[in-house]
Image (spheres, rainbow, N blue to C red):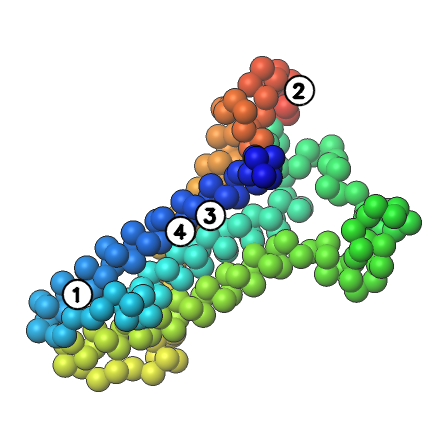
Amino acid sequence: MRRKLRDNSLSLVMLGIFLVLIVFQSLSGWRVSNADAVEHHQLTQSYWRYVRSGHFAEAVFENWESEFLQMGAYVAFTAFLIQRGSPESKKPEGDPSDADPRQAANDPNAPWPVRRGGLALTIYEHSLASALLLLFLLSFVGHALGGHAEYNQEQLMHGEPPVSLWSFVTSAQLWFQSFQNWQSEFFAVFALAVLGVFLRQRGSPESKPVAAPHSQTGTG
């Protein structure tokens, strides 16, 4: 058990932090939502009703959407774009990740899609970016549905008529929320790719070795 915990410690810690933070987000969002309801002379809601509300769904999926877009685009772009000297990039001279998996079709230890070939292999060799971009699309739908519900709730609070889902999706409201998150994600990736060219973090696989000469890491 101790070995399994060690071997999976990164994912377990990330999942644990996520669960703690989303609980705190829901609790603080619940208080904010009820305070807003009191200010507009509306009925407050229970915690369990809040976590099924548009207010909570919009806040959660709006952020998931940008994160999955960033990761999916990064995985896809790093397959063919290069940043010389960055540990986040392939080497300009060639990289093991470019190896044709079809050369291992007869290897009994290769993953099943590699041995099967054809459509199974085509799907498998692009499965990571595809899964991340699918999660982005699902999160975007969740953002749109949650944002629509929350927008109409605010409309009712102000004595205005509700709008259709299509009207909300084509409005500046939804896209302002999305673009402000998307631009920050891509700027963060830019910063990581460029700073990693010159800076180091001992022990991290996202960094080049601290003592590695610049001439060996594509910087010099």
**Residue at coordinates 50% horizontally, 44% vertically from top-left?**
12
Residue type, mark 1 in image: Asn
**Mark sitting earlier along the chain (2/3):** 3
Q: Nearer the viewer, residue 150 or 190?
A: 150
Residue 209 x, y percent position in the rendering: 59, 21
Residue to which mark 1 is pinned: 34
Outermost residue on the front side: it is 1
Residue type, mark 4 in image: Leu
> Which circle, 2 or 4, is nearer the viewer?
4
Residue to which mark 3 is pinned: 15
User: Rounded to the nearest whole Å, what is the CA distance between mark 2 and mark 4?
Assistant: 41 Å
> Which SS class for mark 1?
helix
Residue type, mark 2 in image: Gln
Q: Nearer the viewer, residue 15 or 106?
A: 15
Residue to which mark 4 is pinned: 19
> Badge 3: how crowded within 10 Å, few (<14), some, or many (20+)?
few
> Which circle, 2 or 1, is nearer the viewer?
1
Asked whether disc 3 touches disc 4, contact meaning CB atoms under 8 Å apart, the reply is yes
> Which SS class for mark 3?
helix
Residue type, mark 3 in image: Leu
Q: Quadrant of the N terminus?
A: top right
**Mark sitting earlier along the chain (2/4):** 4
> Which SS class for mark 2?
helix
> Badge 1: how crowded within 10 Å, few (<14), some, or many (20+)?
some
Residue to which mark 2 is pinned: 216
> Which circle, 3 or 1, is nearer the viewer?
3
User: Rounded to the nearest whole Å, what is the CA distance between mark 3 and mark 1?
Assistant: 28 Å
User: Rounded to the nearest whole Å, what is the CA distance between mark 3 and mark 4?
Assistant: 6 Å
Q: Quadrant of residue 50?
A: bottom left
User: Rounded to the nearest whole Å, what is the CA distance between mark 1 and mark 4?
Assistant: 23 Å
